[in-house]
C-alpha cells in the first residue's frame, strides 16, 4: 500500500479548497442563476413555438426529440453568456487581485474555476435539454412519431454535453478577452452569423466547434461525409481543451 506523501496531501487539500472557493463564488453570483433561469424560460418558449409549428406540419417531422431539441440552437447563447460571466465577473471590480492573493497558483485557480463551472452547468444543461423534449412530447401526444428510448437518450445526452462544452469554451474566450461585452459579441457573432455562413460555403467548416457540436444532437441525415455524433463530440472536446490551454497560458503570463 502506497502512503501519500505530505506534499501530495498538501496539493490535494489545496486543490479541494480552490474548487470549493470557486464553486462558492459561482453559486453566490446572482448572474449565474439569472442567466440559467432566463435560458430555461427562453428554451421553453422556443420549444413551444417549434411544437406548434410541428403540429401544423411546418417542421417536416413529428419526432418529439427533434422538435424539442430544435430550440437548443438558440438557447445555447445563454450558456455562452454564462461561461463569459463566470470568467469575467472578477475583472470588473478588481476582485481578481484578491483571488490571486488567496490562490497564487494561477493554473490551479483557473482549473478549479472551470471544474466548478462544469459542476454547475451539467445538470442545468440536462434540465434545459430535457424540458424542451418533454414539452414537445406532451403537446404532440398521440400524434408524435414513435421512437425508442435510445433514440431520445442519444440526442439528449449529446445536447447536454454540447451545452456544457459550449459554456467552458465561453469561459475560455472570456478569460482571454477579460471583457464581458467583447467576449459575448465575438462568440455570438460567430455562432449566429459567421458559423452558419461558413457551413453553407466551406466544406471544412464541419470540423469547426459549432458544426461539430451540432452533429452531437442533430446530425445531418443521409450524408456519408457528415460528422457523426461521436466524432462531433471528440472534435468539440478537442476544441475546448485547446482553447482552455491557450487561456491558461495567457492567464499565467499576463499581468492582472
Image (tube, rainbow, N blue to C red):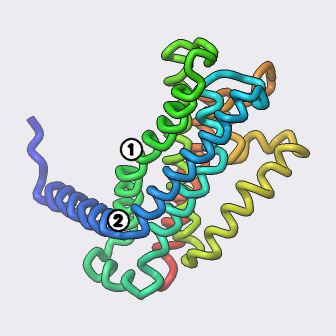
Residue located at (69% from left, 67% from top): 186
Residue 177 image-quadrant placement = bottom right
> From the viewer's perspective, is residue 147 above or below residue 245?
above
> From the viewer's perspective, is residue 193 above or below residue 50?
below
Q: Which residue is mark 2?
A: 26
Mark 2 closeness class: few <14, some 14–19, many ≥20 residues within 10 Å: many
Q: Could you tell which of marks 2 and 1 lies nearer the N-terminus?
A: 2
> From the viewer's perspective, is residue 20 above or below residue 185?
above
Which mark identifies residue 123? Answer: 1
Residue located at (59% from left, 50% from top): 75
- Residue 38 lies left or right of residue 72; in this view the side is left
- Residue 256 lies left or right of residue 13; in this view the side is right
Distance, label 2 to label 1, CA atoms, is 15 Å
Give residue 44's position: percent from left, percent from top: 54, 45
Task: Evaluate whether residue 105 shows in this view.
Answer: yes
Mark 1 closeness class: few <14, some 14–19, many ≥20 residues within 10 Å: few
Residue located at (37% from left, 53% from top): 120
Give residue 107's position: percent from left, percent from top: 39, 66
Give residue 72's position: percent from left, percent from top: 61, 43
> From the viewer's perspective, is residue 189 above or below residue 221?
below
Amino acid at each position: 500500500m502506497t502512503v501519500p506523501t505530505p506534499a501530495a496531501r498538501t496539493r490535494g487539500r489545496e486543490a479541494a479548497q480552490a474548487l470549493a472557493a470557486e464553486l462558492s463564488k459561482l453559486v453566490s453570483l446572482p448572474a449565474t442563476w439569472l442567466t440559467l433561469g432566463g435560458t430555461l424560460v427562453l428554451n421553453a418558449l422556443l420549444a413551444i413555438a417549434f411544437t406548434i409549428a410541428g403540429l401544423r406540419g411546418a417542421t417536416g417531422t413529428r419526432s418529439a426529440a427533434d422538435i424539442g431539441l430544435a430550440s437548443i440552437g438558440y438557447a445555447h447563447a445563454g450558456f455562452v453568456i454564462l461561461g463569459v460571466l463566470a470568467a469575467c465577473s472578477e475583472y470588473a471590480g478588481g476582485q481578481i487581485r484578491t483571488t490571486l492573493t488567496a490562490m497564487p497558483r494561477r493554473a490551479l485557480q483557473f482549473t478549479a474555476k472551470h471544474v466548478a463551472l462544469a459542476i454547475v452547468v451539467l445538470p442545468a444543461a440536462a434540465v434545459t435539454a430535457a424540458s424542451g423534449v418533454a414539452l414537445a412530447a406532451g403537446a404532440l401526444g398521440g400524434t408524435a412519431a414513435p421512437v425508442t428510448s435510445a433514440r431520445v437518450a442519444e440526442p439528449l445526452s449529446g445536447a447536454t454535453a454540447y451545452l456544457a462544452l459550449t459554456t467552458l469554451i465561453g469561459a475560455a474566450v472570456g478569460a482571454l478577452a477579460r471583457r464581458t461585452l467583447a467576449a459575448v459579441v465575438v462568440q455570438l457573432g460567430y455562432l449566429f452569423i459567421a458559423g452558419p455562413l461558413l457551413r453553407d460555403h466551406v466544406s471544412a467548416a464541419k470540423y469547426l466547434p459549432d458544426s461539430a457540436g451540432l452533429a452531437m444532437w442533430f446530425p445531418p441525415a443521409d450524408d456519408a461525409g457528415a460528422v457523426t455524433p461521436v466524432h462531433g463530440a471528440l472534435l468539440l472536446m478537442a476544441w475546448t481543451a485547446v482553447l482552455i490551454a491557450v487561456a491558461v497560458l495567457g492567464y499565467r503570463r499576463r499581468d492582472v
